[in-house]
Image (cartoon, rainbow, N blue to C red):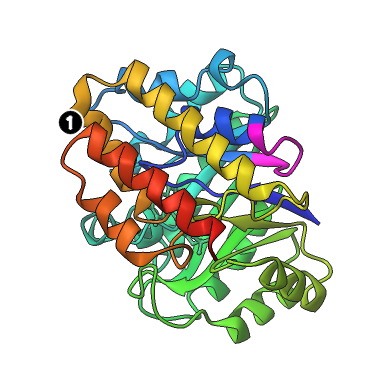
Amino acid sequence: MKIFSAPLQGYTDCAWRNIHSRVFAGTIDCYYAPFLRLEKGAFRNKDLRDITPEANSSYRLVPQVMACPREHFSVLVEKVASMGYREIDINMGCPFPPVVKRHCGAGVLPYPEEVKAMLAVLCEYPDVAFSIKMRLGVENCEEWRTLMPIIAAVNPVHVSLHPRTARQQYGGEINMEQFGRFYDEAPFPVVYNGDLRTGDDITSVSTRYPRLCAMMIGRGLLYNPALAYSGNDARHKIMVMHRLLFEYYRNHLCGDAHLLAKMKSLWEYFLAETGDRKCRKKILKSSSIEKYNAAVEEFWHSLNND
Ligand SMILES: Cc1cc2nc3c(=O)[nH]c(=O)nc-3n(C[C@H](O)[C@H](O)[C@H](O)COP(=O)(O)O)c2cc1C
């Protein structure tokens, strides 16, 4: 079964992807970049730099676009296609309330005519393949039903479904019953996405749905970057990944405060539920790089005592 790395805005940036793909080479079939969008009508250089083919040359990358307002959709597709990409992922899953309110991200799901109008742009790009990343609906977990023929008509390479509503955001029960219906009825390849945290989770979903074209993992790879790795030196590799991320951000971010904030944000997920809780707290509360490094050292020792 193929494994995809899900887009996680603020986490799976180009540095994370490069380092992950180097340390855990061969474990991920495709990395999906966090959504590209226009801000106040313009692209941010930082966002474009993140997806240049040169900076992402050592793995397969599919950029994602999220148009908000949706009138930006064709500008976004045009930009990504002009960078040479021949596959683009369309965000129809972002549950952030201000986005949803504007009928963008997952907010478009209850409006089939708006989905149709947005996807109509794709006919202008016959040499670009499109995938869609979506949820079950906004409030109603059966909104996908009306959309299925509209989506099928644009012939997506696949649709990744996170079986929650936008209202649920990233918590609450995953709706496997609705996922099963979507999987049974979809005339296009389906990718499962949601709450895959362990190797057993991956095995059980892929066994239950053998026709899936891939499993997409988001937070699971932040919790455990070795999730799809089967070697017995996973812990060592995780430490290497941490060191490389630290070095990269130390060289590219401005000053200790920025570096500390970035590293601490990674630890909101990194190895949660593992190691000594007090050490973790120390990392998250560290007020200087020296204290951060000392707390991380202590954390690694606590893992050895597990
Ligand atoms: C902090 C954060 C940022 C995210 N950014 C994106 C994004 O840019 N594009 C997208 O399609 N989904 C985004 N997602 C959703 C994830 O890709 C994924 O669908 C979701 O986390 C559920 O999968 P998981 O349980 O494996 O994490 C984000 C989720 C989180 C928690």
Identify the image quadrant of residue 184: bottom right
Ligand 1's image quarter is: bottom left
Residue nearest the observer in this picture, 249 or 28: 249
Residue nearest the observer in this picture, 299 or 262: 299
Residue type at mark 1 is Ala
- The percent coordinates of residue 206 (x first, y second) are 77, 69
Disc 1 within 8 angstroms of ligand 1 (CB): no
Residue at numbered disc 1: 257
Q: Residue furthest top?
A: 54
Residue at 55 percent of width and 56 percent of height: 304
171 relative to 124, above or below = below
Residue nearest the observer in this picture, 91 or 4: 4
Label 1 sits on a secondary structure element that is helix
Q: Is residue 92 visible?
A: no
- The percent coordinates of residue 108 (x first, y second) are 38, 59
- Main SS, magenta residues: loop
61 relative to 102, above or below = above
Residue at 44 percent of width and 24 percent of height: 50
73 relative to 176, above or below = above
Q: Number of numbered discs present? A: 1
Left or right of 260: which side holds 301? right
Left or right of 147: which side holds 158? right
Residue at 81 percent of width and 57 percent of height: 1
Question: What crowding class fits label 1: few (fewer than 14 Cα within 10 Å), some (14-19), or many (20 or more)?
Answer: few
- Say whether residue 274 is magenta: no
- The percent coordinates of residue 155 (x first, y second) are 70, 49
- The percent coordinates of residue 57 (x first, y second) are 64, 19
**Region rendered in magenta:** 23-30
Quadrant occupied by the C terminus: bottom right
Residue at 59 percent of width and 66 percent of height: 196
Q: Is residue 221 visible?
A: yes
